[in-house]
Amino acid sequence: MLQLTQKLKDGKMQVLEVPVPVLGKGMVLIRNFYSVISAGTESSTVTAARKSLIGKAKERPQQVRQVLDVLVQQGPVQTYRAVMKKLDAWSPLGYSCCGEVIDTANDVSEFAIGDFVACGGLTASHAEVVAVPVNLCVKLAADKNAGMENSDKLLKAAAYNTLGAIAIQGVRQADLRLGETCAVIGLGLIGQLTGLLLKAGGIRVIGIDIDAAMVGLAEKHCADLALTRDSHGIEEKIASFTDDIGVDAVIITAGTDSLDPVNFAGAVCRKKGKVVIVGSVPTGFDRDPYYYRKELDLRMSCSYGPGRYDPDYEEKGVDYPVAYVRWTEKRNMAAFQELIHSGKINLDYLTTHEFKLEDAPQAYDLILQHKEAHLGILISYDTTKPVVRQKVAIRPVAATEKVGVAFIGAGSYAQSHLLPNLKNLKDVSFVGVMTSSGTGSRSVAERFGFEFCTSDVEDILKNTKTKQINTVFIATRHDSHADYVLKSLAAGKHVFVEKPLCIDEAKLEEIKDFYTSSESASSLMVGFNRRFSPLTKMLKKEFGDGPMSMIYRVNAGKIPPDSWIQDMELGGGRIIGEVCHFVDLLSFISGSLPTTVYAQALPDSQNLNDTISINLGFANGSIGNVSYFANGPKNLPKEYIEIYSAGATGIIRDFKELEIYGGKKINRKKLMGQDKGQETMVRSFVDALVQGKEVPIAFDDIYTVTLATFKIMESLRTGKSVKI
């Protein structure tokens, strides 16, 4: 399929052939008929992409600080990889469209194939086919009496779905009553829609903009009084229009760095009135004389409405009870579509231009270069083309190496640590890659030289040339690891899965049963990289396998509660998702597997269990403690390890420094940069496959360490020590 994309590095824009997106849980697959370019938001994105690196840095100071943090913690190589991952990737554009449902996930019952829908959100992009979560989709009313021309007209209007929901939420925040007056500052697309909605609700509308053309449109279609901002005596005209009361509310839909909109809103608003910010404007208003003396209510309007930015709502489809949250973002979308279908608002005048998808880059040139006046710009799609799920060839098929690799999932970790290290190995060829989005798959395929990208896992597992792909790397979200491991092993592939192996004990036992009873020669390894660090190996050589006592302190840092990593259904939580690393390292250093565990967590209101002390007992008598803390400072190095045995002590500081005490002098080893062992891990795995040897981490280790994380959770629930 075709999709409009751009690169953040240079702003290069291109309509690319990419795989059809993966249809995940709670999603519908939609063939687009029309999508709308949001000239304000999208032009800002494109403008930023076309700036120099210095210009980008000035515009995103917070991201620059994040880059500097990575530089301090992980060194220049990993920082460069992380930055280039962002800059080199093809990014989708667009977030408002409409089309026809062509497939639904198994757990979706609200929509059926053939339904026409309007969609919102970042997946509702300028592409021939999009996959959208159910709570960001609304069904269009069926109109059997509508002719072809009228149906097409309704579809074009429906494509304004997201923008309409944004405008509706702004109006709801203004909380106006019939007959009251509202000023709309900024008469672009959102401002015009806001005016139309207000008029449909019986509100008197005053439209204000710096552009006389936009003022003229508003005067004709959606405003009772329309004024340019520099109109002589503008405040007096508004006062006269409102019988010297002032407006009941102001909705600011402008986008500017100026404080004028918010200060002007204070000037024209009546006492106890409301100022609602929808657009991107600064809020450092002058407190006196208006906001303080009038006791004005300044409100923010959050995008499409309640549910926005809530993963449970948007990604999992968990709705809010209507009795408690009357208007969610989805219900706002539905209300907007009903106003269109009933004829209460008419959007015909908003569309000033229409481009075919293949010509879409010209639309952005028109916007950025101000070639001609524009307002609503539609992108249309060829709906006569068949939708075919097929892999997209990136480069000619190369001679098969000993290890033919495919990736299922290829996010930040894979692109920073796995793919670069694999690429340097002579026995490896990159064959296929699959990620959830078409642009993501294509970006990774181009950057690392894969032969093809796909959205169909069968292209990887049932590869027609059986020896072309013999090894699968799994780097998806944690909840999908187990199923992909089982499918890959069943297909006879060697498997490297990024931790954790799985997120529930039943799946662990299923993998164990399959792997240990399988007659195939497939290998399975989990990415427990820290045991491959050169400092770990030095410490291990010094201390051997004797009984020892161990301390592993992890300054884990805070992760927001709504992150997928904290979600037990998606990420398994931080104990299963990350603590497995530290249990594995203590097992490796002690030369023994854990047999008992007792854990205590610092109480927190959301039961995140991410500040926790874990005591482990090992089969050879060793004891260890993992102190995993999310409540420490950012400037404290993340990992600190102490090992005590037979009068000697070894200390690893953040995999940069090693100190060994016990002899006449302290032995010290300091690396040029942090090395957590990823490169050696990947090379060791590939070497084992090439040489036909066992992979470097035994399955018993993988199984027991993974089981230990589940027993940690059990100990937290029961408050008791648990046998592993």
Image (tube, helix red, strand yellow):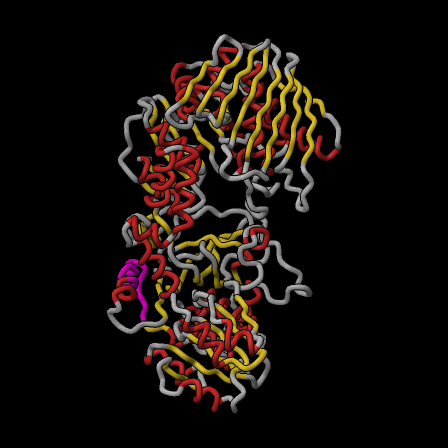
Task: Work out whether 279 lies above or below 397.
Answer: below
Residue 82 occupies which quadrant of the picture? Answer: top left
Most foreground residue, 716 or 612: 612
Q: Residue 495: tell me if it is visible.
A: no
Q: In this view, does 209 lie to the left or right of 595?
A: left
> In terms of depth relative to the viewer, which is nearer, 293 or 95?
293
Task: Tell me: residue 643, above or below residue 635.
Answer: above
Can you say which quadrant of the picture contains the C terminus? top right
Please provide percent x and percent y for residue 111. 55, 58
Prevailing secondary structure class for the magenta stretch in the rendered image: helix
Q: Residue at x 50, y 11 (%)?
A: 542
Q: Residue at x 59, y 78 (%)?
A: 272
Based on the picture, tell me whether residue 356 belongs to the magenta stretch.
yes
Residue 170 picture location, percent across and down? 52, 70
Front-most of 433 and 720? Answer: 720
Range drawn in magenta: 353-364
Name the side, left or right, on which 669 lies relative to 514: left
Q: Can residue 170 be seen in this view?
A: yes
Q: Which residue is drawn at 60% across and 15% down?
A: 592
Rendering coords of residue 470 (x, y %): 41, 26
